[in-house]
């Protein structure tokens, strides 16, 4: 059990590239924290620095208040699960799980007992005398977990542990990991590029981009109040829609209509250094089929007509893809996200109820609640709808 | 085999295999035949000896040169192999895994040593050997053997080390291993096929060497088997020592065959499968 503190930790390489910049993070004892971001954002480097597999260029890493920058991995008492599992192929499952205990020079009887216990918890008892080569992906994953848990370390580090599993197994292992962590209450740092894993597993999530932590918060905080375009676009599936707009005296002007902001929101927006070009973000579930709204709701909504590209009918709801002529938002952060997700410009998504009549190739009237939108600075990406102090 | 091989094709391959086999084995059989012939029929040109005798074998072991020479060969070969493989493994590991200043130079020099014509070094080595008092001693041969065998070992082993996933070593470190323990308990067992291969190569190199051995040794204190064979006298000055040479050649072939037979099972492909995904 340990509290891990990263104090302005930076990792740069001799060739001048910086993998992680000024990352400060307080991980509480027993907390499950997720590092998430697109590939190359520095999340794995951060994990390796906590593990001691990579040196810290500047800043301080403290475990339980003690500086550990210079300590070798073995002296940090932290266990790690690798993306590749990294099981020792020449050892049986039993020997693999026992390996950390053998190195710690624990008595043989005690080792055998602990390994048996571990095998029971992870349902590996029948596999103990097999070699890793004859195990399935999910079994290898469990052995890797067992090897990490068995010595009762101060913290677990998991580096994309589920990315080599098929979709069904991934969901299953996700719940299993979550259950294990709640049971053991061991501080856990988990790296993933999958925002769904991040949202479902973490007590808190760190969204990283280009070596810089963009936002640190609970999954709900990230979803409701993303600090910038990048976080807004990265968290949530289907992703948030972004429309280009201009700030006006009373609100924002989009290519398909004007929105008057409430005084409260307007005050917050104007408290920022306000640019003229902004981007309006709307979550897919906040877009509605105008036909299904009552008159009163239509009053507070912006109604606009779009051409429907495609409809994915999921039974409980319809995912509607649509385009709006000349409505693509431009921003460096969005370009980066688009490169990661493959979503093109000028493609938008609405989550409509199943009774909506949206049909591919036809036009439909959509609307969104003007109180449920986020306004971003098109240049800096900053969210203008949250007060500057926290942004 | 998923692919069905036609009967005609199969027959063709049998013929080709047979030809290759004859090409490879015939000289060995010829030497074996020579070694078993009595002196009177050595030159009869027949593969199957008309009469079989073990006199040649008895003769070389009765002489007071071949026995000690064989002992020298085995001792020098094993010591060379042990030292070259241990040093080679560490060097190869560094070459494969670490970035250090002068790495390219080290690899380059190793290659240079491997390619350097040994004959051009014989005279200086002879002088050095005498000046250091190593002439006609075991170390006098072991040291140059290690020098020439190391590049071989480093090249063979670094290829194997490169194949071992990095993550395994990181995992060992996270599991509480010192770098030394990670090397001994994880890397070396996985590189075992490579280490055995390197050991066989080094041993065969030392075992087969004639040039250095004939230049740097003089008496039974350090003469190796190939040198002893070259120096076999005939039973009289008018008799060629053909039979003895053939017998000696057969005798020094045996350890190599045994060596390979013992270790070939360790050279199993796919030992690292299952370490990482897939």
Image: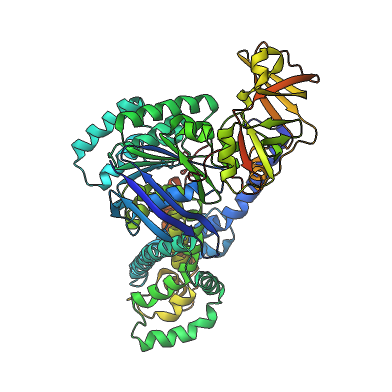
Residue B33 percent coordinates (x, y): 51, 57
B147 left or right of A251?
left
Residue A63 percent coordinates (x, y): 31, 49
Residue drawn at x 47%, y 51% as measured from the top left: A45
Front residue of A289 and B39 = A289
The number of numbered discs placed on residues in the rendered structure image is 0
B105 left or right of A282?
left
Front residue of A313 and B17 = A313
Colouring scheme, one of rainbow, by chain, secondary structure, one colour? rainbow
Front residue of B147 and A123 = A123
Image quadrant in which you'd find residue A157: top left
Residue drawn at x 57%, y 61% as measured from the top left: B44
A261 left or right of B231?
right
- Does residue A105 appear in the picture of this structure? yes
Residue drawn at x 66%, y 24% as measured from the top left: A368
Front residue of B173 and A191 = A191
* Location of residue B23 with respect to A367 vertically, above or below: below
Residue B110 percent coordinates (x, y): 51, 71
As drawn, which residue projects farthest toward the top? A355
Residue B219 percent coordinates (x, y): 35, 79
- Does residue B251 appear in the picture of this structure? no
* Location of residue A141 with respect to B168 vertically, above or below: above
| Quadrant location of the N terminus of chain A in the rendered image | top left
Image quadrant in which you'd find residue A120: top left
């Amino acid at each position: 059990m340990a509290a891990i503190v990263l104090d302005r930790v930076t990792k740069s390489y001799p060739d001048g590239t910086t993998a992680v910049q000024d990352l400060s993070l307080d991980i509480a004892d027993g907390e499950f924290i997720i590092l998430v971001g697109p590939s190359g954002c520095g999340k794995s480097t951060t994990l390796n620095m906590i593990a001691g597999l990579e040196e810290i260029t500047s800043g301080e890493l403290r475990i339980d208040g003690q500086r550990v920058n210079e300590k070798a991995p073995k002296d940090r008492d932290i266990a790690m699960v690798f993306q590749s599992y990294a099981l020792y192929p020449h050892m049986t499952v039993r020997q693999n799980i026992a390996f950390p205990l053998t190195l710690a020079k624990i008595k043989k009887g005690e080792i055998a007992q602990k390994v048996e216990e571990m095998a029971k918890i992870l349902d590996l008892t029948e596999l103990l005398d097999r070699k890793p080569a004859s195990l399935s992906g999910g079994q290898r994953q469990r052995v890797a977990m067992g090897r990490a848990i068995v010595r009762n370390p101060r913290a677990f580090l998991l580096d994309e542990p589920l990315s080599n599993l098929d979709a069904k197994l991934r969901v299953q292992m996700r719940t299993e990991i979550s259950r294990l962590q709640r049971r053991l209450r061991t501080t856990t740092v988990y790296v993933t590029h999958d925002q769904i894993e991040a949202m479902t597993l973490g007590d808190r999530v760190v969204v990283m981009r280009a070596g810089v932590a963009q936002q640190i918060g609970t999954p709900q905080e990230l979803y409701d109040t993303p600090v910038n375009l990048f976080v807004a676009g990265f968290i949530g599936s289907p992703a948030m829609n972004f429309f280009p707009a201009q700030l006006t005296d009373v609100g924002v002007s989009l290519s398909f209509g004007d929105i008057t902001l409430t005084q409260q929101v307007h005050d917050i927006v104007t408290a920022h250094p306000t640019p003229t070009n902004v981007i309006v973000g709307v979550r897919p579930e906040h877009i509605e089929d105008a036909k299904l709204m009552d008159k009163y709701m239509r009053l507070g909504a912006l109604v606009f007509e779009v051409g429907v590209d495609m409809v994915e009918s999921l039974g409980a709801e319809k995912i509607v893809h649509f385009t709006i002529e000349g409505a693509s938002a431009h921003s460096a952060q969005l370009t980066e996200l688009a490169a990661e997700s493959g979503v093109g410009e000028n493609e938008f998504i609405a989550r409509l109820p199943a009774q909506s009549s949206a049909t591919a190739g036809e036009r439909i009237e959509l609307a969104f609640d003007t109180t449920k939108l986020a306004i971003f600075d098109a240049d800096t990406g900053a969210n203008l709808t949250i007060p500057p102090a926290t942004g | 085999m998923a692919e069905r091989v036609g009967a005609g094709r199969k027959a063709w391959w049998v013929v080709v295999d047979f030809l290759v086999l004859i090409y490879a084995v015939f000289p060995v059989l010829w030497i074996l035949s020579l070694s078993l012939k009595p002196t009177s029929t050595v030159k009869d040109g027949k593969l199957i000896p008309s009469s079989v005798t073990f006199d040649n074998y008895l003769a070389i072991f009765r002489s007071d040169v071949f026995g000690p020479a064989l002992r020298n060969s085995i001792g020098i070969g094993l010591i060379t192999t042990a030292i070259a493989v241990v040093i080679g493994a560490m060097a190869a590991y560094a070459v494969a895994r670490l970035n250090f200043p002068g790495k390219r130079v080290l690899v380059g020099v190793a290659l240079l040593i491997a390619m350097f014509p040994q004959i051009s070094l014989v005279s200086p080595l002879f002088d050095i050997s005498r000046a250091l008092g190593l002439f006609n001693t075991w170390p006098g041969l072991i040291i140059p053997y290690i020098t020439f065998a190391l590049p071989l070992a480093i090249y063979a082993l670094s290829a194997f080390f490169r194949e071992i996933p990095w993550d395994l070593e990181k995992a060992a470190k996270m599991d509480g291993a010192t770098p030394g323990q990670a090397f001994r308990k994880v890397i070396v067992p996985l590189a075992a096929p490579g280490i055995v291969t390197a050991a066989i190569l080094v041993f065969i190199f030392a075992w087969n060497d004639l040039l250095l051995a004939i230049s740097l040794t003089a008496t039974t204190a350090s003469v190796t088997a190939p040198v002893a064979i070259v120096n076999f006298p005939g039973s009289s000055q008018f008799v060629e020592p053909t039979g003895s040479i053939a017998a000696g050649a057969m005798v020094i072939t045996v350890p190599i065959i045994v060596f390979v037979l013992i270790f070939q099972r360790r050279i199993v492909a796919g030992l690292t499968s299952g370490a990482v995904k897939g």
